[in-house]
């Protein structure tokens, strides 16, 4: 993120930059926030993949990190995961003997590629522990009560 401008909510959550209220408002107005009002599985997914999409999307929406723009990325993760699971099964079904060593080698190379695709997509979406640790999702804090307000009530 070097050189990239961080969202104002992230800057405020970190608390290491002092901005005036007008600077904060100006930054909020200039930031682009993608809507999350039309998140649905793409039509090219199979029924079982659509169920998985809805399940994962609900989790990502609940932590406020998914938008309409992320639907294809999540679909790609689900497809990569399905491919990885298919190749896992294929590798386990090949007899582990010297007669089939070439088949095992080819299948494990394909399995490894599928795993890498799945893992890459998972990291992009924050679906791995390490990628979630890098995400900073600012929480909205309630405004603090002015401790002098009780003295101002009677004035006037």
Image (tube, rainbow, N blue to C red):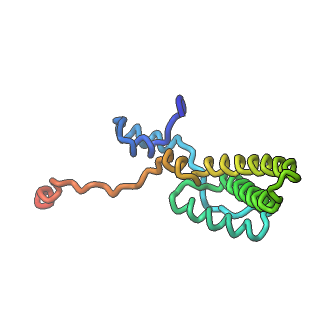
- Give the quarter of the figure containing the N terminus: top right
Quadrant of image for the C terminus: bottom left
The mark total stands at: 0
Is 9 on the left-hand or right-hand side of 98? Answer: left
Residue under the point 42% across and 40% down: 11
In the image, residue 26 lies at what x, y percent? 45, 40
Which residue sits furthest front? 98
- Pinpoint residue 25: horizontal percent, then vertical percent: 43, 43
Residue 92 falls in which quadrant of the image? bottom right
Q: Position of residue 43 (x, y in %)?
A: 79, 63
Q: Residue at x 39, y 45 (%)?
A: 13
Residue visible at 50% across and 47% down in the picture: 135
Q: Eyeballing the image, is 74 above or below 18?
A: below
Residue at position x 31%, y 55% in the image: 143
Q: Residue furthest top?
A: 3
Q: Is residue 9 left or right of residue 141?
A: right
Q: Quadrant of residue 12?
A: top left
Q: Is residue 44 visible?
A: no
In the rendered view, would you say 19 is above or below 145? above
Q: Nearer the viewer, residue 103 or 1?
A: 103
**Residue 104 seen in the current view:** yes
94 or 60: nearer the eye? 94
Point out residue 97 in the picture as x, y percentages from the top left corner: 82, 55
């Amino acid at each position: 993120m070097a050189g990239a401008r961080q969202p104002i909510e992230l800057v405020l959550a970190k608390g290491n930059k002092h901005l005036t209220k007008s600077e904060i408002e100006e930054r909020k107005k200039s930031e682009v926030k993608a809507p999350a009002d039309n998140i649905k599985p793409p039509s090219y997914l199979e029924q079982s993949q659509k169920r998985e999409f809805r399940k994962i999307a609900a989790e990502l929406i609940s932590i406020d990190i998914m938008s309409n723009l992320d639907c294809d990325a999540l679909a790609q993760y689900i497809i990569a995961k399905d491919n990885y699971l298919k190749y896992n099964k294929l590798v386990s079904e090949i007899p582990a003997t010297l007669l089939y060593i070439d088949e095992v080698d080819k299948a494990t190379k394909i399995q490894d590629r599928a795993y890498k695709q799945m893992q890459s997509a998972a990291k992009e979406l924050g679906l791995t522990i390490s990628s979630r640790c890098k995400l900073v999702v600012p929480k909205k804090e309630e405004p603090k009560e002015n401790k002098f307000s009780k003295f101002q009530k009677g004035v006037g």
